[in-house]
Amino acid sequence: MTNPTFSQEGFSLFHKDKPFTLKLADFITDYDPSEHNCCKIPVDLSSDVNLDFSLAEIAAKKIKDKGGFVLWDFHIDFPAKLSQMRFEGLFNLHFHSLKIFSATLYEKFKENTFGCCLYQGTAEVDRIFSWSAGDMVEFQEWLEDLYQVPEMLFETKENALGDIKTFFDIDSHMLDVTPFSRHLRNVYTMNLFMSYLHRLVAALPEDLLACVCLDTSCLTHEGFLVQLLSKERFSHVHMLLDKKRLPIEGVLNFSYNHDVKVGVCFPNDPQCFLSSLNVFKKISGNFFNANIPYKIIPEFLMTSSWDGLDYMIFSKKCLSPQGKRMLQGFVAAGGSGLYIDEPIGLESEMELDVFLKLK
């Protein structure tokens, strides 16, 4: 792999190995070199166009002449039905369009390219696709794989859900009753959508930053949002977030505080329950009010992400056995655990509320 012009390592963005802060203009008419260093340039990759990039090339040259970088803003005509995301013919068409872009327009402006945006729109992606009966069955299977039985997911006693004995007894109307059930549907849809985008990334040069531009204003619950945007779903696709500024890995337009000493161990999907997500929403409010910088780390990435941290917040209820072992490693490396609910027997651990009072 060649050395990329732009790269992201952990929580930090670099331009040719030097720290870089993105200052993005959404439109070329708004671009001001004194305020911006990058501009979105639309590129129409719809299936019904002839892939004429002449207008995009003219716009990109204007940004280049002003010393700026380009974020190629793709328009890809994703299908209206979720099940159609599995059509290989449609995927091949999108893949071919990206290959042509890579061999032509990108090559002309390679040194002046910041990255590309594969999707721009709402983070509530389940609202942009209609579901078939087959989609519902596969969603029910996904719930069963993660949580085994409805009582575990909804944190109730056995047989407390009446006629709902299995996830296959939950119909689509029930999923619109509570914010949490709608959130789970959105997480599942995001899994499928990001899987499709990750396959498309293979058509792009390895050194090109691929991202999605997400409007998160519709999602006010920070616990829900952090789970949705987990690195588990965005392993090779970065994010540009509108409105929200979350201290999570993969966000390109977040000004990260490098002096942060506190990490929050966020649970893996099978340990994400409504009660635990509510707790993490509260933590975020407490740290904001106390003006304490922190970063959120998915449990499965804890070992590779704890460099520079002195404290790691965790919930015993939400820890997997592997997570507990990783926390033991964190403490052995000189860190301290901050528990939300109960201690787990670490050599160095403290109740989170006590820590906040000390701060």
Image: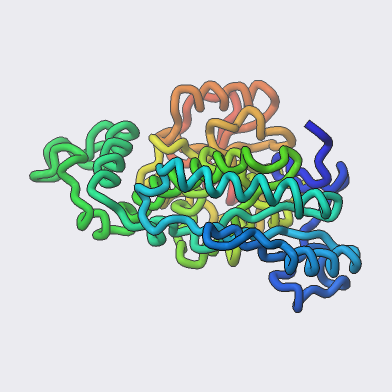
The N terminus appears in which quarter of the rendering? top right
Report the side of 85 relative to 121 (left or right).
left
Q: Quadrant of residue 165?
A: top left
Display colour scheme: rainbow
Give the residue furthest to the bottom.
29
Q: Classify residue 24 as left or right of residue 343.
A: right
Name, please, the residue furthest toward the left: 163
User: In the rendered view, does 169 fall on the left or right side of 141?
Assistant: left
Q: Residue 160 in the image: state x and y as whole percent.
A: 13, 42
Where is residue 310? Give x, y as percent: 69, 36
Image point (63%, 51%), residue name:
211
Q: Residue at x 32, y 37 (%)?
A: 142
Residue drawn where x is 49% and y is 63% of the image = 122
In this view of the protein, can residue 307 be seen by the observer?
yes
Whether residue 264 is visible, yes or no, is no
The answer to whether residue 82 is above or below residue 266 is below
Measuring 47% from the left and 48% from the top, which residue is drawn there?
A: 90
Position in image of residue 77 (x %, y %): 50, 59
Q: Nearer the viewer, residue 182 or 42?
A: 42
Q: How many numbered tags mark residues here?
A: 0
Q: In the current view of this chain or complex, which residue is farthest to the front? A: 50
The answer to which of 188 and 87 lies nearer the viewer is: 87
Question: Residue 222, relative to residue 261: is it above or below?
Answer: below
Rendering coords of residue 302 (x, y %):
60, 32
